Image: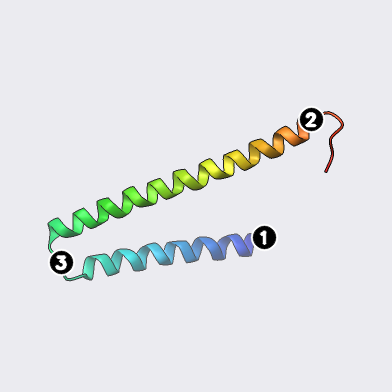
Amino acid sequence: MNKIFSFVIGMLMGAMVGGLIAILLAPSSGEELRGQIQERSIQLSDDIKTVAAERRAELERELAQLRAPGKKE
């Protein structure tokens, strides 16, 4: 499990570094670049919030099932 976790962390870090280099080397002005970064960060934040809300709802349903007396699936 530790090897898998290390691999996933390495992939994420590599993707972030690669993305940053690609953004910095892109042929656009500083103002455009800042706007793009801001838009992407807002979109990423929204996506994370959506996924977190879905996961929370899923976990709350599972918890409710576990708390329900005499109901096992």
Classify the position of the C terminus by image quarter: top right
Other residues around mark 1 within 10 Å, as few (<14) / some (14–19) / many (≥20): few
Residue under the point 41% across and 66% down: 15
* Front position in the image: 18 or 41: 41
Nearer to us of marks 3 and 1 is: 3
Q: Quadrant of the N terminus?
A: bottom right
Figure colour scheme = rainbow
Secondary structure category for the residue under label 1? loop
Q: Residue at x 23, y 57 (%)?
A: 36
User: Could you tell me how far apart the alpha carbons at marks 3 and 1 are, in whole angstroms?
Assistant: 42 Å
Tell which circle, 3 or 1, labels the residue nearer the N-terminal end.
Answer: 1
Q: Is residue 13 left or right of residue 29?
A: right
Packing grade of label 2 (10 A; few <14, some 14-19, many >=20) is few
The residue where tag 3 is placed is 28
Q: Nearer the viewer, residue 37 or 13?
A: 37
Judge the density around disc 3: few (<14), some (14-19), many (≥20) Cα neighbours within 10 Å.
Answer: few
Pointer 2 or 3: first along the chain:
3
Q: CA distance from mark 2 to mark 1?
A: 33 Å
Image location of residue 70, percent across then percent down: 87, 31
Specify the label residue 68 is tagged with.
2
Tag 2: amino acid: Ala
Residue 1, label in figure: 1
First reached walking from the N terminus: tag 2 or tag 1: 1
Disc 1 residue type (three-letter): Met
Circle 2 — which element?
Answer: loop
Q: Quadrant of residue 26?
A: bottom left
Looking at the image, do the residues carrying marks 2 and 1 touch, with CB atoms under 8 Å apart?
Answer: no
Q: Are marks 2 and 3 in contact (CB under 8 Å)?
A: no
Q: Amino acid at mark 3?
A: Ser
Which residue is found at the position 64% from the left and 40% from the top?
59
